[in-house]
Amino acid sequence: MNQRLIGLMSGTSLDGVDAVLVRFDEQGALRVEADYFVAYPPRLREQALALQAIGDNELDRAARLANELAELYAQAVNGLLAAEELKPADIAAVASHGQTIRHAPDAGYTWQIGNMARLAELTHIDVIADFRSRDLAAGGQGAPLVPAFHQAVFGAPEQNRVILNIGGISNLTRLHPNQAVIGFDCGPGNMLMDAWCLRHQGQPYDADGQWAEQGAVESSLLQALLDEPFFRQPPPKSTGRDLFDLPWLEQKLLGRHVPAVDVQATLLELSARGIAQAVTLHCPANQTVFVCGGGARNGALMRRLAALLPEQSIAGTAALGLPEHQVEAAAFAWLGWRFLRRLAGNLPEVTGAAGGRVLGALYPK
């Protein structure tokens, strides 16, 4: 029997929530039927950013923000249903990633907020959420979780592929025939570039990397950024705003007098170098890098990746049948479908968990 699920994804870029409507057949083959996006209001984004760091009254602020996120997620779900002329009864479940405010696998926890009980009330649909904590409980990083989806949807027996997601953080999945799947976070994607652009240009992102292309890479700053131990750490590994945030950048800038536009150029180079280094070291003989996420729309970043990986083709995941902006939300719809079937959603070789685990928790309608 075919089932429809709605996947919700709000990532480290903090730009908004992506909703995708996905139809699954009995074997789990999927087709995305529609998508919908709701932007975060600036105030909500600021509140989520503030919770990335230790501060006063965190429990109350997090709980209030979780309630607001539930309202926004419900707006995305109900907007998608209205656009497609569907009823809540037509949807088997909503699979929601939630908004990460802390990711600390070394301390044994990761925290994604968004009042999921409230979301179930507002949508009248079962909600599946909290996908990461079971993997952590089994000794894993809780991230990245999308490589299992990438393997199921994008794997091919005749080509060495890397699936590269460039969101706030960049992460990749190696899909090489006859080799184990590996996946891990590479380092910053759009996150630092977005934050620096907002501070100095008043814009939430550097459209097409145009501002970065007006600057020059400052080599000593770039080296200081690349000296971060995370880049040398072998997989499995994951990261987020807990490490790569503006205070981290500001510390690296201490004592340096670098024009803002040159910092932006250097941050773009940092993202490109982190990705290229990960592909070169851990994905030898790769043939094509298929890119998804918001970074796929940054032409300057894509051109730099092509220059750093000259022996490989760079393409968007649309070439594989799934548009770049739909991939991550579709992945969580797939994880929701796996939960409903009580099938493992993680790849232990990717996250470091003790074994495959059913991921998620159910909030009935």
Image (spheres, rainbow, N blue to C red):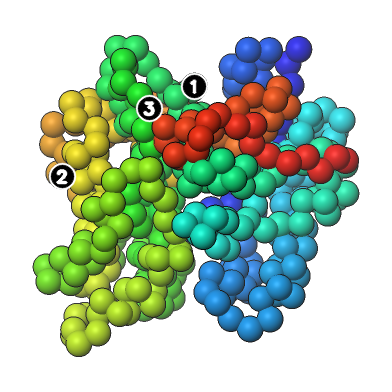
Residue lying at 60% horizontally and 68% vertically, measured from the top left: 48
Q: Nearer the viewer, mark 3 or mark 2?
A: 3
Residue 230 in the figure: left or right of residue 357: left
Is residue 272 visible to us here?
yes
Amino acid beneath label 3: Val
Dot 1 or dot 3: first in sequence order is 1
Q: Which residue is mark 3?
A: 181
How far from the left and from the top, in percent, is residue 288?
Answer: 26, 28
Residue 282 in the figure: left or right of residue 295: left
The picture quadrant where one finds residue 93 is top right
Q: Which residue is mark 2?
A: 308
Instruction: Answer above or below: position of 157 versus 68.
Output: above
Callout 3: 10 Å neighbours few (<14), some, many (20+)? Answer: some
Name the element at disc 1.
helix
Q: Which residue is mark 1?
A: 152
How far from the left and from the top, in percent, is residue 39?
Answer: 61, 58
Instruction: Answer above or below: position of 244 versus 354.
Output: below
> How many angstroms separate mark 1 from mark 3 (CA)?
11 Å
Q: Quadrant of the N terminus?
A: top right
Mark 3 touches mark 2? (CB < 8 Å):
no
